[in-house]
Image (cartoon, rainbow, N blue to C red):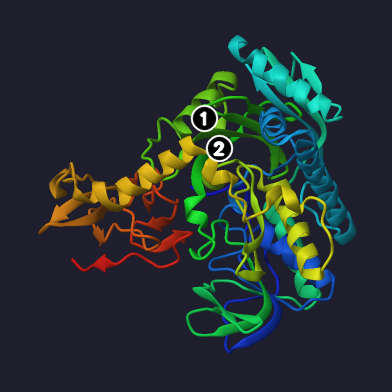
Amino acid sequence: MNSLWLSDNEIFKNLDLDNNINEDLSTDVCVIGAGIFGLTCGYYLTKLGYKVTILEKSDIASKATGHTTGKITSQHGLFYDYLTNSYGHKFAKDYLDANEEAIENIKNIIDEEDINCDFKYQKSFVYTTNKEEFPFIKKEYQAVSNLGYNCELVTKTGLPFDIVSGICFKNQAEFHPVKYLSGLCRCIAKRGGKIYVNTTAVDVKVDGSDYITYTKDHQIKSKYVIIATHYPFINFPGFYFTKMYQSTSYLIAVDTKKSLFNGMYISSSSPTLSFRTAIYNNKEVLLIGGMDHKTGHPSSYKDTYGKLEEVAKKYYPHSEVLFRWNTRDCISLDKIPYIGSFSTSMPNMFVGTGFKKWGMSLSNVAANIVVDKISGKYNKYAYLFKSSRLKPIKNHDELKNMLVQSANSLLLDKLKRPNMTFDEISNNSGSIIEVNGEKVGIYKDENGKIYAVKPICTHLGCLLSWNDIDKTWDCPCHGSRFNFDGKNLYDPAFKNLDTYDL
């Protein structure tokens, strides 16, 4: 299953990327992670004249950024009524303004650097088809209007079905995120920045007034470090694993065989449905997304991609599914990203994470905050996202749920006897079984070849669960993911699973 955005192998052709660090390095800023946040930081910093080294453990945009919807918007669901009630008018307005500026910033980069990434201004809608949800739509409309933003309350859209009500934000945008990142890479390289792919950072330590970032074989010394790894892979002293979880959502790209609507859409309640159009092979296709759930919780094809395909067939009976992919989003307990210093004890190490499902705009907000901190410039939005805040752990319900899940996976689930035996595992499927009193993760491929792993997450030791959709081992605690053969795919873990020879 591959993303539409990553389907063109020519996008990164002729980029100045390096697969190997052959010696210890020294740089001004070491950026760990080459998704949209890390590369945006690299872009702004090299533009200011900083010497920048970027490390990416796999390929550019191969994780969250390459699996997004590619919406650039300040409309983050029904969010501004919550912000106003929880933090006040000024806080909510500044959050809105920060994301509106991010849209403009991205457009300015695209224009200034002549990046061809299918950028297009669109109207954005949050809608409902349920009459009982109309009061929530109306409250959100009133909250946004009170912030001075010119939104619209609508009852008709371009969607192929009727809605009860919706809120429309004008002058939002969509783009091809991977083409955009390719453009950022070219700009970074042109200004002397170095980007190393297939290079895993395994630790960062303080060295006097500097930092040492360690890879498997070499060290990078820098004055500043930016953790841009989607989910921070360093546990202490930041403790982000106690304040954040990951959610998995699904997308399909569909050739509808019909002309399509304008605009970007998302439903106001779960199960979420998201719609936008995109260009593939010079033709407009429809992207349908949603069906999110906490990462690591088992789900079926029927309840994820199957539901999205049902929607496509319902409104476009002759449609053809071209691509299927899914992504993981980091979500803080108070729904606000962590941006700024990684920890008060590590003042020149910075982080940007917890972008929820709105990383295209929030990554630019985050990059500007972090770059301003490095360059000694005041940023009026930094206070919104203070990474050392305690508010998230005061969200007692979600904190309790996360701690219970972690406790179960760390201890209680390990004591339970597995439900399946080796013979009950069918080909092209996997499960945990017990062998001589130890739990073993077994996957049998389509031909019956067996892959056996120790199903314990290399991050903090949680018991993994089998994902039969993607044929992966997923962590229900913090969202790490491993291939069926034990290779690490997603952070916060960066080490592979132990394997058994059979």
Q: Give SS at disc 1.
A: helix
Locate residue 335 relative to residue 83 in the image: left or right. left
- In this orientation, which residue lies closer to the viewer: 214 or 92? 92
Amino acid type indicated by mark 1 = Leu
First reached walking from the N terminus: tag 1 or tag 2: 2
Crowd band around label 1 with a 10 angstrom C-alpha radius: few (<14), some (14–19), many (20+):
many
Amino acid type indicated by mark 2 = Ile
| Residue identifier under label 2 | 252
- In this orientation, which residue lies closer to the viewer: 413 or 38? 413
In the displayed structure, 443 sits above or below 51; it is above
Image point (47%, 28%), residue name = 307
- In this orientation, which residue lies closer to the viewer: 275 or 201? 201
Residue contact between numbered discs 1 and 2, judged by CB atoms under 8 Å: yes
Crowd band around label 2 with a 10 angstrom C-alpha radius: few (<14), some (14–19), many (20+):
many
Q: Quadrant of residue 185?
A: bottom right
In the displayed structure, 280 sits above or below 190; it is above
Q: Give SS at disc 2.
A: strand
Q: Residue pushed farthest left?
A: 436
In the displayed structure, 103 sits above or below 26; it is above
On the image, the x and y values in percent for residue 291 come to 50, 32
| Residue identifier under label 1 | 308
State whether residue 259 appears in this view: no
Locate residue 149 relative to residue 393 in the image: left or right. right
On the image, the x and y values in percent for residue 70 come to 68, 44
